[in-house]
Image: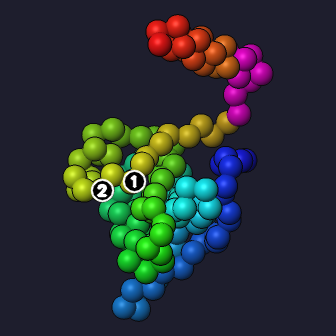
Amino acid sequence: MELGKGFSFVSRKYRISLEGEHFFIDLVFYNYILKCFLLIDLNKGKLSHQDVGQMDMYVRIFEEKMRQESDNPTIGLILCSEKNNAVAKYSLLNDSKQIFASKYKTYLPTEQELQQEIAKEREAVEMEKRLK
């Protein structure tokens, strides 16, 4: 799977230790074009407020200990099988703008589903161009 341009793999199961307790970030990337870290938490279940709080902690730790002055803010991404928009909205403090939750599919779409999605996206882009 490709994330896009500029991504560099840093670690899988990146360990953070705080006063004898150990925490593990599933995936850590650095984007040398955007100049920021991307932390990814892979969640098999439904998004919970604990997941959001945990990612918030990871982002804050990276902001304090890993981010350089020239880097942009760290981004946290939680991929879950079920997303609860209310939990995602109310679990974050107002100043936390760089944490995102997204639902993923546990199966690959069919070729026909992919073609339909591509056609739908093309139409949306063309409609946007016409409106400008």
Helix, strand or loop at mark 1: strand
Vertical order, 83 against 128 (above or below): below
- The residue segment tinted magenta is 108-116
Residue at 60%, 72% (x, y): give it. 13
Q: Is residue 114 magenta?
A: yes
Where residue 132 sits in the image (x, y, percent)? 47, 13
Using the numbered discs, state the Cα–Cα distance from disc 2 to disc 1 in whole angstroms: 7 Å
As drawn, which residue projects farthest toward the right? 111
Q: Nearer the viewer, residue 18 or 128?
A: 128
Above or below residue 41? Residue 103 is above
Q: Could you say which is closer to the camera, residue 43 or residue 16? A: 16
Q: Secondary structure at mark 2?
A: loop
- State the mark number for residue 109: none
Label placed on residue 99: 1
Q: Of the residues shown, which amino acid type is indicated by label 1?
A: Ile
- Residue at 64% x, 71% y: name it: 11
Query: What is the three-letter code of the residue carrying label 2?
Result: Ser
Q: Report the residue marked by disc 2.
A: 96
Image location of residue 88, percent across then percent down = 32, 46
Residue 55 in view, yes or no? yes
The residue at 25%/56% (across/down) is 95
